[in-house]
Amino acid sequence: MKVRGRCPRLLEPMETGDGLLVRIPSRAVHLCAWAHMCRAARAYGNGTLEITRRGSLQIRGITTHSVSALVDELMRAGFEEPVGPIVLTTPWPDGDLASEIDTEAIAAELRADLRRQSWATSLHPKTSILIDAGSSLHFDAITFDLRLRFLKTDRGPMLTITLEGDDAPRPAQMVVSAADTVSVARDLLAFLSLRGSTVRIRDIVEMEGPEVFWSLLGDRVVAATTPPSRTRAQPIGLHRIGEQTYAVGIGIPLGSMSADAFERLIDTATKAQAESLRPWERHTALFSSFDRGAAEAFQAEAGRLGFIVRDDDPYRNITTCVGSPACSRGQMQTRELCQSIRRTSPSLLDGSLTIHVAGCDKACGKPTPTTITLTGMEDGCELTIGAQEDARREHWTALEVPKRLRQISEKIELMRRDHQQACDVLALAIEETRPISHEGK
Ligand code: SF4
């Protein structure tokens, strides 16, 4: 079995500090299959599971001896290895679009089409496509090479085409009919493949402009009014998906959990008559479907099991990577630091700030923007406030880190007045807690 240096898949695991890692893309699969996956993760891995920012599920700690057995178990349970680029969908179209579109059918047709194309496996391994149902549960916080989003137009339901990198605001956007979607996506990707396996759509858009893509598509695309931007998706909580049916979004604390804990959650959902589960963006999982009472009971039980059940939970404002020792590059035990921030520095988690704890300067999975970034270094930790260009930086030793964070949190509590949030007094609180001898960079 081939081991990947990056972008792992089912049949191409990635070497990490705690063994091989297998990744399953975000897809709705029956709960029985996910329960089977939990047992396999325990038997053949170290029992640690993660749901990533892009909504993939990762199984950690697999050995070179156990990986084939794990993959066999997953295939038997119904998980599939995608060929070529990842094609994702968004679930449950809102309102009357629901009766006019079937995002899953289009995605399935595109996946099947790509399986027949010899060039599909030579695309950049991170190439990704989204078929977006136009719902409020969207993937707008995540980048895709190609996005196709349903839109009601005066020509009927169409899909807007967004190329990664072509993000200048425009009154009009290219659209394609549902019937031409697969051929248009295929032609765009075939053109991309001619540029080699290191090139993404963004690279071509930036160098040559988006017109080079539009010229391939002839009269299959036309311009239509750009749809309004959507409010931030809130995956955690109850989602009405039918007349009497609901889905429940659950947050995974720091994106990581044991296979035991996840299996207990799946078992609870099964007993509540739910059928499927989809790992979802920003470290969440969507369970469906329930009646209202069962959905509420499941949500309450998930909270008791230690999962996040409210989108405004303060712990949602802190993100991290696996860090040391699971990642061989890690200079810091990131999850432990996050837990310590939650226990000892609650003012930093009042919802006005976002914090990312990175095990090293690679900063995998760091959301943009982030207010505070703590980066593990060989000799301690770097604190960065704000964006790269005008960021303030300080260097702390490893011993200083929890103490400084606690002091800043306490200072914020003392300094803020009515209606002020942590973000309003953060800079001053850092200034006032800086040791006399410490020079910020
Ligand atoms: S940021 Fe560094 S420590 Fe964290 S997962 Fe990436 S490489 Fe590993």
Image (cartoon, rainbow, N blue to C red):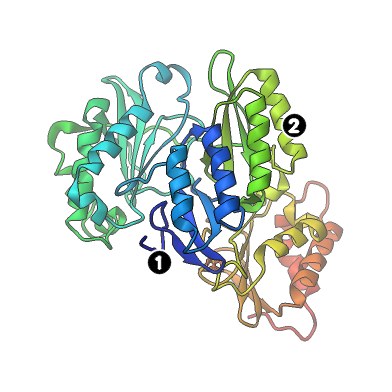
Q: Is residue 196 visible?
A: yes
Q: Position of residue 297 (x, y in %)?
A: 73, 26
x and y, in percent, of residue 207 in the image: 24, 60
Residue at x 36% of width, y 44% of height: 169
Q: Nearer the viewer, residue 252 or 266?
A: 266
Q: How many marks?
A: 2
Residue extending farthest to the top is 243
Q: Quadrant of the N terminus?
A: bottom left
Q: Which residue is mark 1?
A: 5
Callout 2: SS: helix
Where disc 1 sits, the SS reads: loop
User: Does residue 232 appear in this view?
Assistant: no
Q: Is residue 397 left or right of residue 240?
A: right
**Are the two marked residues, 1 and 2, in contact with CB atoms closer than 8 angstroms?**
no
Label 1 amino acid? Gly
Decide which of 283, 229 is in the foreground and name it: 283
Quadrant that contains the C terminus: bottom right
Q: Residue placed at 66% from the left, 19% from the top?
A: 292
Amino acid type, mark 2: Ala
Residue sitting at 33 percent across and 41 percent down?
170
Ligand 1: quadrant of the figure = bottom right
Task: Give left or right: position of 399 versus 137.
Answer: right
- Is disc 2's CB within 8 Å of ligand 1? no
Counting residues from the start of the chain, the first of labels 1 and 2 encountered is 1
Which residue lies under the disc numbered 2? 300
Crowding at dot 1, Cα within 10 Å, few <14 / some 14-19 / many 20+, comes out as few
Mark 2 crowdedness (10 Å alpha carbons): few <14, some 14-19, many ≥20: few
> Compared to 99, does 29 lie above or below?
below
Q: Position of residue 61 (x, y in %)?
A: 56, 61
Q: Of all residues shown, which one is farthest toward the bottom?
A: 437
Residue at 26 percent across and 53 percent down: it is 121
